[in-house]
Amino acid sequence: MSDVPPGKHAMVMRWRAHLEETLATLERTLGAARSRMDVVGERPTNRGERAEVTSQGYLADGLGRRIEEVRTALALLEEVNLAASDRIRAGSLVAVEEADGGMRWLLVLPGGDGTRVWDEDRAVSVVPPGSPWVRALRDRGVGDEVSIERATGPVTVRVTSVT
């Protein structure tokens, strides 16, 4: 990672640590859900007990899926090219200026979910390569203007930085 800008490298490491912490939490929660599915002795006889075992099973299933998503994101993170680029792609750190003059920083990484990581005094939103913002900005460079559809209506942004 010697050709990765230092600030970007630090943010990627924070994101990796966040994913690893999330994975550990999910795995602990999955263990607790599975332990509550265990039936000691006879099968539950009342609806409440049966419902509890069933709901813990559904919870365990959902947690298992989320664990696989996070593991996949961690594996994909290892493959992302983080070197500086003049075009927006996976691994890019992007600054865009909105029409009202506000700045938005995006770090395009697997598993991104809008969580913010901090670099000095700026908040940077980690977004996945398939997000609507990244799809609209993909392969754009500094100076390009793009209209992005949001829930509140379209917004035009201008790319001011790509690393």
Image: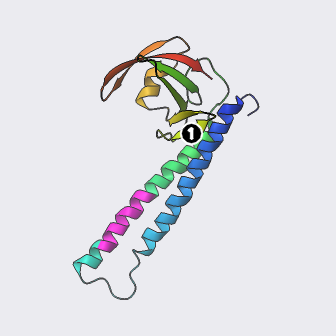
Return the residue nearer the eye: 161 or 45: 161
Nearer to the camera, 58 or 151: 151
Vertical side of 108 occupied by 141: above or below: above
* Furthest residue in direction left, as rendered: 47
Residue found farthest to the bottom: 41
Q: Nearer the viewer, residue 136 or 38?
A: 136
Q: Position of residue 34 (x, y in %)?
A: 44, 71
Identified at 23% across, 82% down, the residue is: 46
Dominant secondary structure, magenta: helix
Q: Is residue 50 left or right of residue 112?
A: left
In magenta, the rendered stretch is 52-63
- The quarter of the displayed image where residue 154 is located: top left
User: Is 50 located above or below residue 156 in the figure?
Assistant: below
Judged from the image, the secondary structure of the residue bearing numbered disc 1 is strand
Where residue 116 appears, as percent x and y from the top left, is 52, 39
In the rendered image, residue 19, in percent from the top left (x then y), is placed at: 56, 49
Q: Pick out the residue farthest to the right.
A: 2
Q: Nearer the viewer, residue 49 or 13?
A: 13
**Is 61 placed left or right of 121 in the picture?**
left
Location of residue 66 with respect to 9 vertically, above or below:
below
Q: For the point 44% across and 25% down, which residue is it?
A: 135
Q: Residue at x 40, y 57 (%)?
A: 62
| Residue name at image x 56 percent, y 39 percent | 117
Residue 37, magenta (yes or no): no
| Position above or below: 60 against 96 | below
Q: Quadrant of the N terminus?
A: top right
Total tally of numbered discs in the picture: 1
Residue that badge 1 annotates: 117
Name the amino acid type tagged 1: Val
Using a 10 Å C-alpha cutoff, classify the residue at mark 1 as few (fewer than 14 neighbours), some (14 to 19) or many (20 or more): many
**Does the magenta run of residues contain 58?**
yes
